[in-house]
Image (cartoon, rainbow, N blue to C red):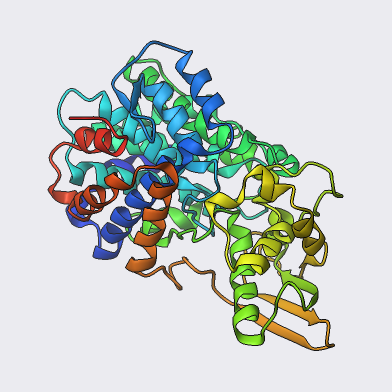
Amino acid sequence: MSASEVLARHALSVEWAALPAGAQDAVRIFLLDTLGVGIAGARAPFAAQIGAVTQGWGNGGPAPVLGRAAILSAPQAAFINAYQIHAQEFDCVHEPAVVHPLATVLAALMADTARQPLPVTGAEFGAAMAAGVDIAATLGVAAKTGVKFFRPATAGIFGCVAAMARLRRLDVATTQSAFGHALAFASGTMQAHVEGKPGLPIQVAHAAQASLMAIDLALAGVPGTIGSIDGPFGYLTMFETESDLTPLLPMLGKDWRIAEVSHKPFPTGRAAHGAIVALQSLMRDHGVTAANLESLTYTAPPLIHRLVGRPLPVYPAALTANYARLCFAWLGAVVLTRGTVGLADFVPGRLSDPALHALGSRIRVVADANPDPAAFTPALAEAVLTDGRMVQARIDSQLGSPTTPLSREQHLRKFRACLEFAGATDLADPLIDAIDRLEHQTDMARLLRSAAGLPD
């Protein structure tokens, strides 16, 4: 069988009742988390402009838009919801895959659920989520070299197709055709990351939107390529420098990738999270402050240096929110001044604060010799203080990862903070209660409309 057939058969076979308890819990947790992040994303930089552009692409439709109390056509809604979910770097991530699976998968599923002729149950929706994450993350884990194309978008579109195929219970052939059309639409590079531009969430948005087109074309009987994954010009050949999918295929249905997804406790690039926690530890355990810090060095795997080791622009050069979220020098300065980083930190006044820029100039990220292109840990923070002391904090697991998960209290605190940022605190308790009882929901379209602030 081709890889596309194996992946299609697996996605279509997922049943909620057969998922292990840990996978079911992860579906509930990250559904709530992603909805919260998406609602907060309505106030992300450029969200207003993206929303206006998206609304100009058509006139209304059935699909809800998070944080806006609006409905659009399914492709439009998938685009804006995916943008909002990823725009503030607060959405969950599968670290080994270097994929943000739910930014694309949930946005596509929300849109497709809204256009189904019959109500979608919570169990069906949850199974589709798990299927989509499995496919997107498996493609990411198959990669053996560093990210050059933006994997949350390029692998994400295949996860979206898998999720919708499972939701609709399509046959294998139609799902394979949809994968083939997804290959035609797959795109996204790391250039926006280098420049600190909003192109990353736009690429995620395109993937979610295009996945609906891929499904629609397959449903219309338009044949897609069969070798979309492992063909000589398929996804893995064209988008990854080196990959090995073969040993992962027998693990489908055994290792549930949704249970491997990590929370993001801070609205920054995931690669900065270990450094933030290490700095918090230095402040708590060794008395490091903005006043007594001579220098801070975070020595970490090459991926960390590549993703968040960028230098601060020379003051007073402009610092954008997109750049700042991926710059530990600036993020570390924020932590030193107030102990953490939150959604409200990425505003013009903070981004242009000369004191933060001066403090950030004392902070750097250094790459170690770790050969794993997807490694986030181990890492070591070393602070040299003005009194001559040198203190250290080691990070072996990132907060929010499966090995160091957020507690339920921390998870719900983040969700409530997202809704507070969006001015939607009244939605918090009903959504928490509904998603805690996901498998008992009889109409997910109705629940998702309520999450968008729309009346029944």
Q: Is residue 118 above or below residue 437?
A: above
Kindly identify the residue that appears in the image at 32 percent across and 19 percent down: 219
In which quarter of the view is residue 18 placed? Answer: bottom left
Q: Establish if 167 lies above or below 266.
A: above
In this image, 260 relative to 50: left or right? left
- Place of residue 351 in the rendered image (x, y in percent of width and height, measured from the top left): 70, 48
Which is more toward the observer, 262 or 181?
262
Residue 449 appears left or right of 99: left
- Furthest toward the top, the residue is 59
Quadrant occupied by the N terminus: top left
The percent position of residue 209, horizontal first and vertical second, equals 45, 26
Q: Residue at x 55, y 48 (%)?
A: 89
Tag count: 0
Pinpoint residue 163: horizontal percent, then vertical percent: 34, 39
Q: Position of residue 71 (x, y in %)?
A: 33, 23
Residue 169 in view of the camera: no
**Horizontal relation, residue 205 to residue 121: left or right:** right
The quarter of the picture where residue 389 lies is bottom right
* Quadrant location of the C terminus in the rendered image: top left
Tell me what residue is drawn at x 53 percent, y 58 percent: 266
Is residue 118 in view? yes
1 or 68, nearer to the observer:
68
Please tell me whether residue 416 is drawn above or below residue 107 in the rendered image.
below
**Quarter of the image where one finds residue 167:** top left
Residue toward you, 399 or 341: 341
